[in-house]
Image (tube, helix red, strand yellow):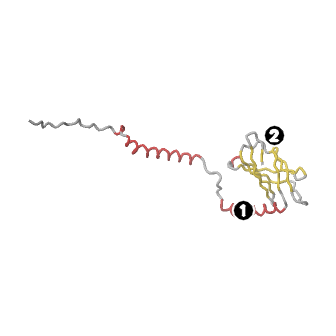
Amino acid sequence: MTDNTVTRSAPRIAARWHQEPIAWLVFGLPAVVVVASFVTLGIAMEGSDTLVVDDYYKQGLEINKVLVREDHAKAAGLAFAPDLSVDGALTLRFNANAGFIFPNEIDLKLNHATRDDIDRTLPMTHAGNGVYVAKVGKLEQGPWYIDASTAQWRVVNRVSVNAKGEMKS
């Protein structure tokens, strides 16, 4: 006699969805992307880009006036060497062509390269022999642009202020 018995294996019990690795890929990765997009949105909304000005078109038109003033400074041979003392006094020692007459006062703009909230504008007084002095106090660490100008000319130097408050050209 032949044995006609069929051997049956035990029925496979389906695993719960949270125990399947593919389910974590299907649902988990998009969920991570959604969370990351909200984090990115939060970072973007936290602060505005202060390096972009609102009236960029008007400033673009006025660049020609600035370039003319810089050309006048080059023609006069104007250049300066900055020095920041420990008490916060900024001294600019100008060199110029013979016969150049230094004004009694110039405008000083101290512009941080990335943080416009700490920029400063103040007058500098002439101490004689092309030397101008202003009390600026302590400057934050980082790159700065020193903009010395009058209505006729403009000279800009880039300097770096280290953690000790020392200025390097």
Say which quarter of the image contains residue 100: bottom right
Check the image and report above or below for 17 versus 119.
Answer: above
Quadrant in the picture for the N terminus: top left
Residue at image mark 2? 86
| Image location (x, y in percent) of residue 134 | 82, 47
Check the image and report above or below for 58 versus 48.
Answer: below
Check the image and report above or below for 146 versus 73.
Answer: above
Foreground pick, 90 / 75: 75
In the picture provided, is 3 more to the left or to the right than 140? left
| Image location (x, y in percent) of residue 65 | 75, 63
Say which quarter of the image contains residue 22: top left
Residue beneath the point at 53% across and 47% down: 40
In the picture provided, is 77 more to the left or to the right than 2? right
Residue type for callout 1: Ile
Residue at image mark 1? 63
Q: Regarding mark 1 in the picture, which secondary structure is present there?
A: helix
Q: Regarding mark 2 in the picture, which secondary structure is present there?
A: loop
Is there CB contact under 8 Å for labels 2 and 1? no
